[in-house]
Image: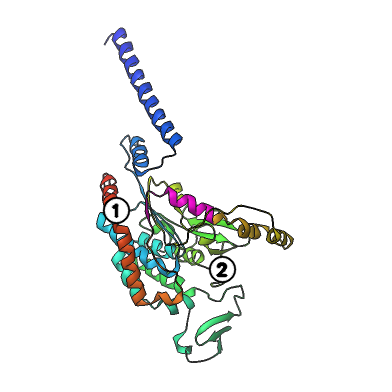
């Protein structure tokens, strides 16, 4: 090839590269100007980005499991539909009950196995650490713990605020994870993160592998125990010198967490029923008292509710948003009949998105 031909070829190649780059910038600018964030946009961006080995990377799916107490059974119903559609998540994030479901799903349990667990488990005793052998005693103290009809109410070793210890839930989750050889974050089949909150400073704390300021991540079951520690009901969890409570205080639907993990397409299962507009910040007596007591961040949380703002943003970022219609729940809803009913409600809500879920499954199946 002579010099003239070589120069002509290089010039043509350069022109093609410039044209392609200009088109990509124009598409991105148009998308940003229109404020559009869609499944097609994210998937197209993911496919357009070359993988390190020069091959095109397939879009990655992020699964988000929101908090919602006993309503967590509905999330399992939705997971059954995702499996029916052929969707396999690449990343999972969960808060509170969503952290329990998410951790077990990331370890390799199927939706059917989780349904069996939720419908057969004695949740009231599990969540309350109730001792069946003391259920007939009005009051009994054993090993520094005071029980009322078998329910532990005061502990000599852990006097922190909160009636329930949550120890049995942690043990149950840990034992089930160990059956899948997945007690630590790095041993899970699917990358998983859960959300907790630092009570005093009102800070969101994301727990997982290679995230956070931990010398080493805690065991998955311990992280889940922190994520579900509803303030006032469960005692906070101590991890790495930090006092952690239920992640719903800061981020009840952690869509942003799976996006940070690398998801291109997000499927969110939201159990929250009440929707609120963002709360406007304003100075008031609560803030003043909080500052005086040295609890400024917590008082600011009460007056501004940053969790509401984040929730409203996150649910709009989801590409598939599943929000099963469920009544408010309490501990009594953890019964077998209610669990089966909520699984069915979750299935029905997810089935409304079945066509889109199948399209996502087909789009993301290549290269697995």
**Image location of residue 272, percent across then percent down:** 45, 62
Q: What element carries label 2?
A: loop
Q: First in sequence: mark 2 or mark 1?
A: 1
Q: Is residue 326 above or below residue 145?
A: above
Please name the residue shown 44% across and 49% down the image.
316
**Image location of residue 276, percent across then percent down:** 51, 57
**Image location of residue 90, percent across then percent down:** 35, 51
Q: Main secondary structure of the magenta part?
A: helix
User: Tag 1: Cα neighbours inside 10 Å, few (<14), some, or many (≥20)?
Assistant: many
Range drawn in magenta = 308-322
Please name the residue shown 45% across and 34% down the image.
33
Please name the residue shown 47% across and 82% down the image.
130
Q: Is mark 1 on a helix, strand or loop?
A: loop
Tell whether position 320 is magenta: yes
Q: In this view, does 70 lie above or below 48?
A: below
Tell me if 309 is positioned left or right of 362 in this view.
right
Quarter of image, res 200: bottom right
Quarter of image, res 231: bottom right
Give the labeled residue for mark 2.
Answer: 231
Tell me if 85 is positioned left or right of 25 in this view.
left
> Which of the labelled discs sits on residue 76, or is there none?
none
Give the labeled residue for mark 1.
Answer: 87
Image quarter of the N terminus: top left
């Amino acid at each position: 090839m002579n010099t003239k031909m070589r120069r002509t070829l290089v010039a043509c190649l350069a022109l093609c590269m410039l044209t392609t780059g200009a088109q990509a910038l124009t598409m991105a600018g148009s998308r940003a100007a229109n404020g559009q964030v869609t499944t097609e946009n994210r998937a197209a961006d993911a496919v357009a980005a070359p993988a390190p080995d020069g091959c095109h990377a397939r879009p990655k799916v992020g699964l988000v499991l929101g908090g919602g107490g006993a309503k967590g059974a509905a999330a399992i119903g939705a997971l059954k539909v995702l499996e029916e559609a052929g969707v396999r998540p690449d990343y999972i994030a969960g808060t509170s009950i969503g952290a329990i479901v998410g951790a077990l799903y990331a370890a390799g349990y199927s939706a059917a196995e989780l349904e069996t667990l939720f419908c057969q488990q004695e949740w009231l005793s599990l969540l309350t650490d109730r001792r069946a052998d003391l259920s007939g005693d009005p009051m009994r103290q054993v090993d520094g713990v005071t029980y009322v009809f078998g329910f532990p109410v005061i502990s000599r070793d852990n006097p922190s605020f909160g009636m329930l210890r949550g120890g049995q839930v942690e043990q149950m989750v840990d034992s089930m994870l160990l059956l899948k050889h997945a007690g630590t974050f790095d041993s899970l089949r699917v990358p998983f993160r859960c959300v907790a909150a630092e009570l005093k400073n009102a800070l969101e704390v994301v727990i997982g592998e290679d995230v956070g300021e931990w010398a080493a991540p805690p065991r998955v079951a311990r992280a889940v125990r922190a994520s579900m520690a509803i303030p006032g009901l469960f005692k906070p969890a101590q991890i790495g010198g930090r006092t952690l409570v239920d992640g719903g205080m800061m981020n009840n639907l952690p869509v942003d967490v799976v996006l940070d993990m690398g998801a291109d397409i997000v499927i969110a299962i939201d159990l929250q029923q009440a929707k609120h507009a963002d709360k406007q910040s304003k100075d008031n007596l609560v803030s003043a008292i909080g500052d005086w007591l040295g609890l400024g961040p917590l008082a600011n949380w009460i007056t501004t509710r940053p969790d509401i703002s984040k929730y409203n943003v996150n649910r709009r970022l989801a590409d598939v948003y599943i929000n099963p219609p469920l009544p408010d729940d309490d501990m009594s809803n953890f019964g077998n009949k209610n669990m089966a009913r909520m699984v069915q409600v979750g299935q029905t809500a997810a089935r409304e998105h079945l066509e889109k879920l199948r399209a996502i499954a087909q789009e993301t199946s290549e290269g697995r």
